[in-house]
Image (cartoon, grey):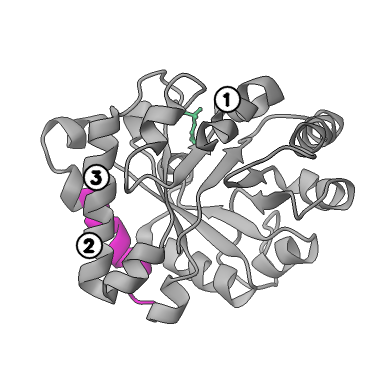
Amino acid sequence: MRKNIVAGNWKMNNTLQEGLELAEELNGALEGKEINCDVVICTPYIHLAPVCATIDTDLIGVGAENCADHLSGAYTGEISAPMIASTGAQYVILGHSERRAYYGETNATLKTKTELALANDLTPIFCVGEVLEERENGTFFDVVKTQLEEALFGFSAEDFAKIVIAYEPVWAIGTGKTASPAQAQEIHAFIRKTIADKYGKEIADGISILYGGSCNASNAKELFANADVDGGLIGGAALKVETFMPIIEAFN
Ligand code: PGA
């Protein structure tokens, strides 16, 4: 059955030393604790190899925040899926709204990135979600459906089953505004139904759908208590062990 996952998204934060310190501190906090979800940290590229070498990767999964849309070659400044996998990382965030908004990533590009991630045994944490205007004018169901269809519904059921979905309403990211538990459940159930219509109930029931957007110690438990919310993708609150741990422990 599907996994509960709490994944941190460090974004563009932490020097190499700060990041290593944070990862080591988290590793120490998790050691010997009863934890009822998978814990993942998605870090800037520079942290991947040293973090994987330092922490217990059975305790904490490690992921990148993006990958290139090509396998190798003359793409100055890019980092490919095989390079990420070679660090020991197992995950990659794809389609984060900041990548879509600031770096022009389209569903077509994201389809290619997802293909490359899967071909290199990385688990994509694939982000979907609407902006405020789309929430307010009620088109958010269509927006999310289109993101899924255009980027992901070309995959075989076998490949699709390996993907983790993160629903992140753009209006809730870093704003301190959170989707209410009812809003989260409504759209998560819609996402699962959309997947079931395409791939069948068994596949849909096995997919982890995470919530992201100002998730923190005080709202995580209520959000995660919903039947279709299988954890969280955590930005700001993942930057300190004392704010990240209570979100992980929301599953206890
Ligand atoms: P936030 O970010 O928790 O800081 O809102 C979530 C995300 O962007 O993944």
Q: Is mark 1 within 8 Å of ligand 1?
A: yes
Is most of the magenta stretch helix, strand or loop?
Answer: helix
Binning the other alpha carbons within 10 Å of mark 3 as few (below 14), some (14 to 19) or many (20 upward) gives: some
Image quarter where the C terminus lies is top right
Above/below status of 41 relative to 91: above
Image quarter where the N terminus lies is bottom left
**Residue at the disc numbered 3:** 187
Question: Image quadrant of residue 135?
Answer: top left
Q: Which residue is rendered at x = 47% and y = 64% of the image?
A: 163
Q: Is residue 37 visible?
A: yes
Q: Locate residue 190, reporting x and y percent.
A: 21, 52
Please report contact status of discs 3 and 1: CB closer than 8 Å, yes or no. no
Amino acid type at image mark 1: Ala
Amino acid type at image mark 2: Thr
- Label number found at residue 237: 1
SS state under label 3: helix
- Cα gap from disc 2 to disc 3, whole angstroms: 10 Å
Query: Which label's residue is closer to the chain start, 2 or 3?
Result: 3
- Cα gap from disc 2 to disc 1, whole angstroms: 30 Å
SS state under label 2: helix
Whether residue 147 appears in magenta in the rendering, the answer is: yes
Q: Locate residue 189, reporting x and y percent.
A: 24, 50
Whether residue 135 appears in magenta in the rendering, the answer is: no
- Of all residues, the one furthest to the left in this rendering is 137
SS state under label 1: helix
**Residue at the disc numbered 2:** 194
Amino acid type at image mark 3: Ile
Q: Which residue is rendered at x = 30% and y = 66% of the image?
A: 150
Please report contact status of discs 2 and 3: CB closer than 8 Å, yes or no. no
Query: Which label's residue is closer to the chain start, 2 or 1?
Result: 2
- Cα gap from disc 3 to disc 1, whole angstroms: 23 Å
Q: Which residue is rendered at x = 18% and y = 48% of the image?
A: 141
